[in-house]
Image: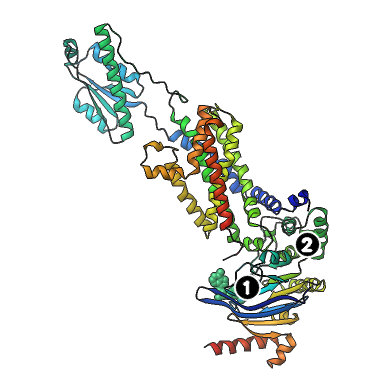
Amino acid sequence: MSEVAVRTVALHKRFGALVAVEGLDLEIKRGEVFGLLGPNGSGKTTTIRMLCGLMVPTSGTGTVAGFDIVRESESVRGAIGYMSQRFGLYDDLTVAENLRFYSTVYGLHGRERDARLAEHSAALGLTERLGQLAGTLSGGWKQRLALACATAHRPQMLFLDEPTAGVDPAARRAFWQSIYVLASEGTTILVTTHYMDEAERCQRLAFLSRGHLIGVGTPKEITTQFNQPSIEEVFIALQAKDEGAAA
Amino acid sequence: MTLRERVRAWRFWPMLWKEFIQMRRDRLTFGMMTFLPAVQLMLFGYAIQTDVRHLPLVVLDESRSAESRALVTTMVNTRTFDLVGPVASRAEALRAIEHGEARAALVIPPDYLTKLARGETAVAQLLVDAADPQTSGSAMSSALLAAQARGLALIAARTGRAPPIEVRVRPWYNPEQRSALFIVPGVIGVLLTITMTLVTSTAIVRERERGTLEQLIVTPIGGTSLMLGKLVPFVLVGYVQMTVVMLLGRVIFGLPVRGSLPTLYLFTVAFITASLGIGLLISTVAKSQAQAMQLSFFFMLPNILLSGYIFPREAMPEPAQWIGLALPLTYFLKVLRGILLKGVGAEALWREGVILCGLATFLLAVSVRRFRKTIE
Ligand SMILES: Nc1ncnc2c1ncn2[C@@H]1O[C@H](COP(=O)(O)OP(=O)(O)OP(=O)(O)O)[C@@H](O)[C@H]1O
Ligand SMILES: [Mg+2]
């Protein structure tokens, strides 16, 4: 199998006159925890949606898990897990029902599925809440459930769009522990975040501003390359520079 | 893969399972779907009376003879008129009509008897409140028939010969010509159309609005599985509704079931599927639940007006008839009335069945094709 989990070449997405993603060239290696950073509206969600086959790029190409994101989007769907930015599970189903629904849709059946779900919900600490309606969970637990639903089928590639937005610090730390467990099992992870402490936890980072890439590398490379003390400073400096260049 | 494994792997099953759970938990919709039929049946069954009966009639009898009284009796016997009383003058008769105490007035002039006795044509006059053309039409034709019958009886008595022609009308299928009987099968069809299009049209849009559609279509579930999983639970709802209305119709209005119920239920599946297909089509166009509902209601109007539910299609201008031909309800009404009222079977209704199946397949195919697994 190829060493590259995600590759995009000159990926563009336009909404009418608005250019949401512009000439994006990105490469994510297998098994990497890759962070996508950028201010609101910089095109993070749009990029992920194109990679997941939810939006068709205006131009450019890309592969995910070796499949073309336009021509083979159904194969892409089978190989990935996705947590949308907005909570997308069924409020009127219980935790157990959501898990059962998604794992079955992803092709797990019968005893194999039940065993996997028992193990999986135990690993994510959901066992005690199995009977609770998803709509009544608190923010942190909702995100936990969404992660569980996106990973029960052991996808090769996982897309997490702001998975820890609105989650308290302890729950965020626990969430990141789960991310590391998944990564240690070989899952490639693309995650977006506005928390710079989370960005430092990624193996590599990409900065987006107004739809285009303005920097890629490990957190260390990036801080030294841009001569800033922290990722947060880099973020602010890069954005100011990019907006200055545009003005 | 063996067939068994393939059937099990079909992503339609989890979808169906989820939809049933959600339907069970959505008490409001569930209640609406069972309560609505009862209310509608009462509303339509009682309120829509297209047959004209018991019009209040006043009589100005200036002849005051046995002959004039015989004419009044003949009129009242048609059951179109109810005698509300005699009046003393033309002015009084007109006032009764103006005030709405009477819808018609029969005026028999003083020379009525003398003209009859002399063998001349006696003239009586009927004043009708023609504000409502349907009512006045019935009143006039009833009065004319009554007068003719009376005339023929007189000739027969005078000549001692039987009247040369007599047309005996025997209304079939609905001998008392009660419009409730005609309406109730229609209520079944209209109700199914309303609920089926409304619930399905909002079904997919609702997932879009709640943000669950994005998470759902990022899975490998196919468009057909997704759509069928949404639809099948509603087929059952449709059957429950239809059964409820038929039972109520039987208890309240004495609705007969002259033909075979299994045949009716079989034809119904095609109709329900076609209605669901329309709902799905709406849901692929609408951007919000509110839009979906508006479109569904917009679609209801031609169904109520042009399908032959209340107004006979034969009386409509041609373009209206053509539109009616595109509505599944038009065919289903024929099936319902045919099986329930006339007691005919599939041999008389196969054309309607074929057309309904065709419409259902077409609508489903178009909406599945239109459905894209993207969120743009
Ligand atoms: N479906 C759409 N139609 C029109 N414009 C859109 C659509 N989706 C996104 N956009 C626009 O594209 C741009 C990029 O949006 P996107 O959601 O990708 O940003 P983001 O980086 O995820 O932002 P955030 O951090 O707020 O989530 C924005 O200007 C947004 O308004
Ligand atoms: Mg976003």
Element at label 1: helix
A58 relative position to B164: left or right: right
Crowding at mark 2 (Cα within 10 Å: few <14, some 14-19, many 20+): some
Q: Is mark 1 within 8 Å of ligand 2?
A: yes
> At 61% from the left edge and 73% from the top edge, which residue is drawn?
A46
Crowding at mark 1 (Cα within 10 Å: few <14, some 14-19, many 20+): many
Task: Kindly indicate whether the residue at mark 1 contacts the one at mark 2 (C-beta within 8 angstroms).
Answer: no
Q: Is residue B258 above or below residue B290?
A: above
Residue furthest toward the top?
Answer: B160
Q: Which residue is mark 2?
A: A126
Under mark 1, the amino acid is: Thr
x and y percent of residue B210 in the render?
A: 60, 60
Q: Quadrant of the C terminus of chain B?
A: bottom right
Indicate the quadrant of ligand 1 in the picture: bottom right
Q: Is residue B167 visible?
A: yes
Under mark 2, the amino acid is: Leu
| Viewer-closest of A70 and B117 | A70
Chain of the residue displaying label 2: A
> At 53% from the left edge and 28% from the top edge, which residue is drawn?
B344
Q: Which residue is mark 1?
A: A45
x and y percent of residue A12 in the render?
A: 59, 76
Chain of the residue displaying label 1: A
Query: Which is in the foreground here, disc 2 or disc 1?
Result: 1
User: How many discs mark residues in the rendered view?
Assistant: 2
